[in-house]
Image (tube, grey):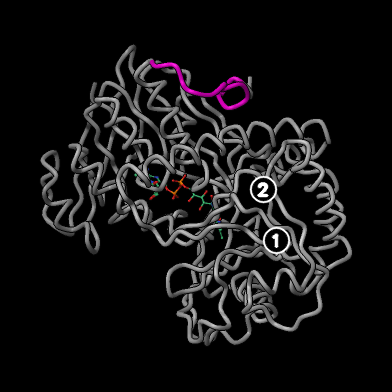
């Protein structure tokens, strides 16, 4: 079976891998010059199924309101007339009810635990190294933080997930680089892990190519056209950038000289849409109206100057929802959420304020680890659905499938959702129950 995957983010690459393992002839079409150059590039790298839950949670609307007016807030809403934003926000509010929250969290965690097993299998079977660390330490400054941690702890007890409640002194034993900041303690999840998502994607791309997967970079899918039982992809090949230039030239179906663009039509047996936040526009003409909205987040990466004062693994500041993660000899600081502005600029007022928040948090906890003024900055759009879980599998057309809407947790869910979608394309029974993880939940 010839399958084309649209998008070479972490979700697309994992899907391509599982399809190739299932014996399909796979082509991946990506508009960028390589794998994981969209939102998968700069994320925090956390894979912590037990910590995972939807952003639409009880108490969040009130908490958000108070955050919106703070100066170093992790959440920003830019006033916008975009009807998609207001429709998304209305649905998000509805999902904050206790019953909906619990249902959505169970769906996300079901997929995330399965996905971690698949990730572990790939890592061990193919000896993939991607700057992995073990354990997650959630740091609690006090006040509202501690109340929220109590709810999390109750859930961890109920579901039998390993965890330890730590005093501030215990936290410092685990992370000796922590500053003298006064805080109440932490919650430690030994089964959590982190890793460099784009590095993993590059390894997986190599494994894919060894299995015959063909990557077509520098090529955009403009339209998915269905006619009866057939599906045709209209693609435009532009000038490929960087490492992909040579690969794009070696694409047999394209023939444009550099700098020009050419349109190519492809007719595979099946298509999987894994185009991140851009998936909604590709799926709309097929009658699939997903309430997918881009929620911007920022990150910084900086070389460690003094390892004694740097994090050993991953910590999350619960008040600011900012992750500080060790990635090899660098620190990644990631978080914040901005709604209402789809542009990905690093020189905007929004970016300036987000960077100030990230810098404040990392300087509070690990002030001596790096020269933070030398950090490189990044911004990406999370493909968010208002309720939280992604949508996997069939669309309304028998040859078109999707793997979209993983929001703030694609890296943690991609290996599992890739395998599930490959199972559905090749008509195999997925290993977990898909209730609430398919298009059926939107009616
Ligand atoms: C600040 C921040 C921190 C995060 N931290 C974490 C974390 O700790 N753990 C975690 O699990 N997740 C985290 N995430 C979320 C995670 O990064 C995203 O959910 C994930 O990268 C989305 O993966 P994707 O493959 O769906 O999308 P993308 O990585 O955006 O990939 C989609 C690809 O499709 C391509 N594409 C789009 N349209 C077309 C088209 N028409 N034709 C051809 N190609 C197309 C794009 O170029 C892109 O390469 C974080 C996100 C942010 C912003």
In this view of the protein, which residue sits in the foreground, 236 or 108?
108
Q: Is residue 35 magenta?
A: no
Count of numbered marks: 2
Is the C terminus in the top left, top right, bottom left or bottom right quadrant? Answer: top right
In this rendering, position of residue 66 left or right of residue 388: right
Say what secondary structure mark 1 lies in.
Answer: strand
Q: Are marks 2 and 1 in contact (CB under 8 Å)?
A: yes
Density class for disc 1 (Cα within 10 Å; few <14, some 14-19, many ≥20) is many
Instruction: Give the residues in magenta.
Output: 428-440
Numbered mark located on residue 138 in the image? 1
> Between disc 2 and disc 1, whose residue precedes?
2
Say what secondary structure mark 2 lies in.
Answer: helix
> Taking 359 as reference, is 49 above or below it?
above
Helix, strand or loop: magenta stretch: loop
> Taking 438 as reference, is 361 above or below it?
below
In this rendering, position of residue 301 left or right of residue 181: left
Residue at (68%, 55%) from the top-left corner?
80
Q: Position of residue 399 (x, y in %)?
A: 36, 19
Residue at (24%, 49%) from the top-left corner?
206
Label 2 and label 1: CA atoms lie apart by 10 Å
Q: Which residue is mark 2?
A: 51
Q: Position of residue 81 (x, y in %)?
A: 68, 51
In this rendering, position of residue 147 left or right of residue 327: right
> Taking 174 as reference, is 403 above or below it?
above
Is the N terminus in the top left, top right, bottom left or bottom right quadrant? Answer: top left
Numbered mark located on residue 329 in the image? none
Residue at (40%, 34%) from the top-left corner?
273
Determine which quarter of the picture holds residue 144: bottom right
Q: Position of residue 232 (x, y in %)?
A: 28, 26
């Amino acid at each position: 079976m010839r399958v084309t995957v649209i998008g070479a983010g972490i979700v697309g690459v994992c899907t391509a891998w599982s399809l190739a393992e299932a014996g399909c002839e796979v082509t991946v079409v990506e508009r960028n010059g390589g794998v994981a150059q969209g939102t998968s590039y700069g994320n925090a790298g956390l894979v912590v199924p037990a910590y995972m839950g939807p952003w639409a949670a009880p108490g969040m609307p009130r908490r958000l309101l108070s955050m919106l007016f703070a100066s170093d807030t992790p959440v920003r809403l830019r006033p916008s007339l975009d009807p998609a934003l207001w429709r998304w926000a209305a649905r998000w509010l509805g999902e904050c009810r206790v019953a909906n929250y619990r249902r959505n969290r169970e769906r996300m965690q079901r997929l995330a635990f399965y996905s971690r097993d698949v990730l572990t299998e790939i890592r061990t079977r193919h000896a993939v190294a991607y700057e992995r660390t073990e354990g997650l330490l959630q740091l609690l400054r006090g006040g509202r933080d501690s109340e929220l941690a109590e709810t999390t702890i109750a859930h961890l007890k109920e579901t039998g997930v390993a965890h330890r409640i730590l005093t501030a002194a215990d936290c410092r034993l685990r992370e000796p680089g922590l500053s003298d900041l006064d805080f109440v303690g932490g919650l430690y999840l030994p089964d959590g892990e982190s890793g460099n998502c784009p590095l993993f994607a590059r390894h997986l791309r190599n494994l894919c190519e060894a299995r015959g997967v063909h990557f077509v970079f520098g090529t955009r899918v403009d339209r998915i056209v269905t006619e009866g039982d057939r599906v045709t992809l209209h693609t435009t090949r532009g000038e490929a950038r960087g490492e992909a230039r040579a690969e794009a030239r070696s694409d047999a179906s394209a023939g444009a000289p550099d700098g020009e663009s050419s349109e190519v039509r492809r007719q595979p047996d099946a298509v999987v849409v894994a185009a991140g936040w851009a998936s909604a526009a590709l799926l709309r003409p097929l009658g699939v109206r997903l309430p997918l909205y881009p929620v911007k987040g920022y990150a910084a990466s900086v070389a460690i100057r003094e390892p004694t004062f740097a994090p050993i693994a991953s910590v999350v500041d619960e008040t600011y929802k900012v992750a500080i993660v060790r990635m090899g000899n660098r620190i990644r600081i990631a978080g914040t959420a901005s709604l209402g502005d789809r542009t990905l600029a690093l020189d905007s007022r929004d970016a300036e304020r987000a960077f100030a928040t990230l810098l404040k948090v990392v300087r509070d906890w690990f002030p001596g680890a790096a020269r933070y003024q030398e950090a490189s900055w990044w911004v990406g759009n999370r493909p968010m659905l208002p309720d939280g879980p992604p949508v996997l599998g069939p669309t309304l057309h028998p040859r078109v499938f999707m793997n979209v809407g993983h929001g703030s947790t694609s890296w943690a869910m991609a290996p599992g959702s890739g395998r599930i979608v490959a199972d559905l394309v090749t008509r195999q029974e997925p290993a977990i129950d898909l209730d609430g993880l398919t298009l059926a939940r939107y009616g």
